[in-house]
Structures are given as structure tokens and as C-alpha cells.
Image (tube, rainbow, N blue to C red):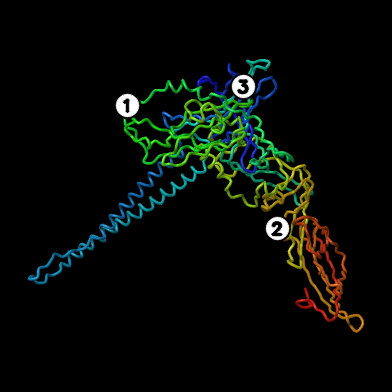
Amino acid sequence: MTVEAVQRWGSVLDSVVVYEQGAVCRRLARGVVPPGGRVRVTGLPRSLDPGSLRARVQGAGGARVSEARVEVEAEPLGTPVSDGLRGSVDRLREEYTAAQGRRDHQLSLIEEVGALCPVPPARRREDGHRRTPVDAWLELAGFVDERLTGLHARLVELEEALRQAGHELGIAVDRLARASTDAPSAHVDTTVSAVLLVDVSGADDPGAEVELELEYGVPGAVWAPAYRLTYRQGGRSGRLVLRASVAQRTGEDWTGVSVGLATADLRRGTDLPRLRSIRIGRSQPASAPSGWREPPAGLNDLFAGYDAALPHPASSAPPVAVPSRPLPPPPAPQGYGGPPPAFSAPSDVGGAATELFAGHVPAPAPPLRARTGGRSSAGGPSAAPAAKAPAAPGGSPPPPPPAAGPPRPSGAELDYAALVLYGPDAQEGRRGKLFPENPFDPVAAEYRRRAESVAALPLPGHAVRPRESAGSFDHRFDTAARADIPSDGSWHTVTVGEIAVGMHTEYLCVPSVEQTVYATLVLSNASDQALLAGPVEVTVDDDFLLTAALPTLAPGGVRRVGLGPAEGIQVTRRTNLHESTSGLRNSTTVLDHRVHVELANRLPGPVTLEVRERVPVTSEPDVRIEERADWTTPQEGPGPDRHAPGTRVWRVELPAGGTAVLDGGYEIRMPAGKALVGGNRRS
């Protein structure tokens, strides 16, 4: 079936799911299936992974997609497409080159004028001394000075023009680099489409309009979570909005699409592991793999008539240019025998030596792609009858014969959806057989390389890769509204939705280290989704406060977020140490430590303040520590909430304008012959 007989359908990008690296796009196409059922859906990006294409018919009705493959069409444009940014870069580059040429010409003029100097004529031996014409010398010096002054003034103007042209060129190049890659080339029109075979034989109404859904994966998309927190001073709840920083360079602009954000690894394999059995007994030959068939007998005789009908080259053909050394034959695919036989040219081709053509194999014609599904016959040189290979040029030994026993095809040779049926113009060992298609496409590889460059983008401040913060679980977040994300490789902020969280403000102080009170926001995740680590913009009473780092918060978890010093709460700490002895014959040294803390709340509302102190711990059996205070031992938490040994906590409720006094202490009792390292007197 020709290309003209295939009906073209336009498609619309409907939704995108962005993973840790890469994305899965979903396109919709609608139309009436033509006779034959072959449809070409256009609009696919150049960087898509051909092996990830999936197609299905939306809704019930008996229609189904029985075949799907990706095809790329490229044709030169008669009239070049105008590209604003690229044309601007070319124009500014020409202006910069012209300005540089004028500057260089001016420098050459300055060098030429600066080299002017008086040269006296040659004096003969019999001539006497001449008088120097000082006026002429001074006149020449004045001319040179005047000329250089004008030239240098012009040089300053030219250098400023060159600097300005370079600045404008740099801006244009940067804009071109940041511009969207969803733009056609200026000389070649490349169309990536999916050719589908839609079967409507089982449909209720074969002539009705059907809707097709295409799903494919693309590289070049990354994301990182971000948040915006708004609450009122002294309130018990707030508003936490989940946002995402998304960057993509997939080659197509995402306009008006539903965006999903997932933490899973898109490249992770999902194939089930295969456990081989272990048998004890007699050795048995390996069974042929399921789905493998030997090529039919007499396959080479099928092309005898085709070879006989080929025109033979005339003896008067013009000379053919040959390389200075033979070209290497194309490599054989894995799992098959040695390279195909060397192509020997007729002896009457331009009088060239036959050995110059050894190893030069003509490029095969485009193969016919096999249909997916069902058992097919696949084979190669290893499955064909063994034939005596001709000796390679230079006296090298022929390739070894194929191994005896049943064929052992690789996984790529059993993937019938990726095999192609080679036609009569293919190499001798490939005609009429199924082989894996060479997946290397230099143009597509360049598109994918440019798309994957977004993985090296520097993250925004306090941002964390979603795969790192998700831990052992995978999460997905869907945006509440459709969004626009251009393919320019820059970060774009997308609002996902509001998350229900509980929050209240507490204040923390460690006066033994620093007599400053710090405000902390206690967040509790009341939703069924985890909050991934990322930056959070905190707004208090409609005033932006700061941007902090939000830790990963599991469903039902509680974590603290630091908000910085609270200047409205004052704290003062004083200590007192009294050293004495006790016991029989004063055998015990008693170190009595007293701690006095004064608190004052200057904020307009009540606050909850947590004051932390530290009591020494010991592993010596003859050293005792006795506490004399109303503080409590904090509960141990995971990770950052883990407290140091000996930590004690006071929790105080301070009203607006209120004060409080905290007194505590501890005694250290140890043998009189011992002392603390660094001295007994401690703060």
C-alpha cells in the first residue's frame, strides 16, 4: 500500500505524566476508518522512543488496533521557513563580523601611520655633513600626531560598536538556545507519525467515527516539588499549595495538557524474572525456544527468477571511483554467524582490479516490516544450510562454521514486533528472513541527546530530586487544571493543588548554646499522600517571610520547619556552681549546678516555648547525677528529631506580654580523688 493510500489523521496532545527522568505522553486522534483500516496519525515528536508506542481504541464498540509502528518522513522545503530567532542570530553574526573587520582595518591604519618616520638619504663618503631639516621633521611629527589622534578616536567608536554587536549577538544566541525546540527546520520538513492498522470488522457500525489513543515515551523531562505555605499568626491551620518545577526539552510544546508527576523510574525494567529448573539425571539436549521456526527449505531458490531478471552491467560502463582501501563489511547481528560473503565485482567494470571491491557490500533496500503477533519464521546464517565460505582477501582464514545443535536466538531475535522482513535486494544471508532492524538513527540520537540535556539542569534552591526524597515508595500527583510547558529546557512552575495539613507555631530555645529564640512551624500531614522534600515559601499574615526547606513528610507524620529567630521573645540564662564535700572523711565531692532562665514575651499573642537544657551523662559506676528540676525527658523521634543523650525540656505557655522564670539544676557526686576533665566549674 502506497503512502498516498494511507489516510492522515491529526492528533492532539491530551495529557503528560512526568517521571523522574522522561515522560509518557498521551495523544488523541479521531476520524472514520477508511477501507483497509490503515491510518497515519501525525504530530508525534522526533525524540520519542519507537519501542514505547502503544495504541488503543477509546470506548467499547468492537474496533481494535492490530498493528502500530513509527515512521519518519523527511522532504526538502521549496520555500525555506522563516525562523525569527535563527535569522536574527545569523544577521547579528554578520553584523558582528563586519564590525570586527572595520575594527581590524582601523588597527592596521593606526599601525601604518605610526610607522611613518623620516628617512635621510644615503650619504656618499666624499660628501660632507648635511644640515638636518628640523622644520620638515617637526611637520612630519605633527602630521603623524594629528592623524593618530583622529584614528584613535575612530577606533574607540569602532570598538564600542563591536562590543555592542557582540552583546546583542550573545543575547540572541542565548535566546535561541533557550527557545522551544518545537519548531520545524528551516530547510527540511520532518514528520513523525504512527501508522496504525485498525480492525473494525467486529464493530457495531464500521462507518462510525472512532477515537484513537496513542501513548509513547519521550526523554528530556524532569521535575522537582515546591510548596507555598500561607497561614495566620497564632492560627492552628493554614493553606499548603503543592507546586512543581518542570523542565522539558522533548521537542514539542505541552499546551493545555493535564500534567501528572510521578517519582517512579521510567527506565526501570518490568519484565518478570525467569527461574530455570535444575534437573538431576542424564544430560538432555536443550529444547528449541518457544516461537522459533527454521527457515523453509529452498528459500534461496525463491529469488532465482529475480536474480535472472536483473540487468547486467555493460562493458562500456564509465570508470567507477573506488576507495584506496576496502571498506569493512557491515557487522552481523548478535546470535548469528560470521559476516556475509564478500561482494566480488565483475572483471569488466572500468578495468578496476577485482580485489579492490572485496568487502564492499552495496547498501540493501529498505526492508519490509513484519506484522506483530503470531509465530513467524526467523533465521540467519546459523539456521541456513552450511556452505563453504570464500576465502577472505589477504589470505585470512574463513569464519568458523556455526555451532551444532538447536539455534539459540537472542531476546532481540524473538521480539517479533521489532523484526523486519528483508526483501530480495538485501544481502545474501538476509533475503526473505526476519532480522532485528538496526535501531541506530543518527538524527534521532541527536534529538534524544539534546532532550536528555535537561537532566543536568541545576535544581532550584532547597530542591531535591523526587527519586531521592520518595524513598522506597513511589507517588503520583495530578494537576487540578491544565498547564502550558514549552520545550525550552528551562524551569517552569506548575500548580498541582492544595494539600490538607495541620500546623501550629512553636518556639524553641537552647539558652546554654545561644540565648536566642527560634520560631518553628510544626506540620502534620493529614492527607493520604506523602509530601516530598523541597523548598517552601512561607507567607505569614499576607507578608512573605522566607523560603525554607521542607523535609519529606509521610502521611500522618509530623515534622518541624524552621522559620528563623523570633525577636519578640527575650531569654536570659544564669548559672551557679557550688562545690562541697560529703560522706565519711569527706570522700565524696558534690558539684551542685543551678540554672536560672528568665523568659519575656513581647509578641501580641500567646506563644508556646520549648526550652532545652542538657544534663551530663556518665558510664562510671561510682559517679552519680541527681536532677532537681521540673523538666522532662523528650520522646525520641526518627532522623532529625532524635535528641542528644541527657536532653531535658521545659514547655512553657507564655501569654502576650507575660514573663516566666525557670529554675533547675543537678548534682554530680563523685569520689574525692576524681575531677572532671577541664575542671569542675562548668557553666
Q: As shown in the figure, which amino acid type bears the numbered disc 3? A: Val
Q: As shown in the figure, which amino acid type bears the numbered disc 2? A: Gly
Q: Which mark is residue 198?
A: 3
Q: Are marks 1 and 3 in contact (CB under 8 Å)?
A: no
**Can I make out residue 43 in this image?**
no
Q: Where is mark 1, residue-wise?
A: 315
- Left-right relation of 386 to 292: left
| Rendered-image quadrant of the C terminus | bottom right
| Residue 444 percent across, percent down from the top left | 52, 37
Q: What distance separates the C-alpha of mark 1 from that of mark 3?
A: 51 Å
Around disc 1, counting alpha carbons within 10 Å, would you say few (fewer than 14), some (14 to 19), or many (20 or more)? few
- Left-right relation of 273 to 356: right
| Residue 180 percent across, percent down from the top left | 53, 39
Q: Secondary structure at mark 3?
A: strand
Direction bottom: furthest residue: 585
- Would you place residue 660 above or below residue 216 in this image? below
Q: Where is mark 2, residue-wise?
A: 564
| Residue 236 percent across, percent down from the top left | 79, 49
- Left-right relation of 265 to 119: right
- Quarter of the rendering containing residue 15: top right
Q: Are marks 2 and 1 in contact (CB under 8 Å)?
A: no
Image depth: mark 1 or mark 3 in front: 1
**Can I make out residue 65 in this image?**
yes
Identify the residue at image location x=38%, y=50%: 162
Around disc 2, counting alpha carbons within 10 Å, would you say few (fewer than 14), some (14 to 19), or many (20 or more)? some
The answer to which of marks 2 and 3 sits earlier in the sequence is 3
Q: Are marks 2 and 3 in contact (CB under 8 Å)?
A: no
| Residue 335 percent across, percent down from the top left | 57, 37
Q: What distance separates the C-alpha of mark 2 from that of mark 3?
A: 63 Å
- Would you place residue 412 above or below residue 647 in this image? above
- Quarter of the rendering containing residue 317: top left
Q: Secondary structure at mark 2?
A: strand
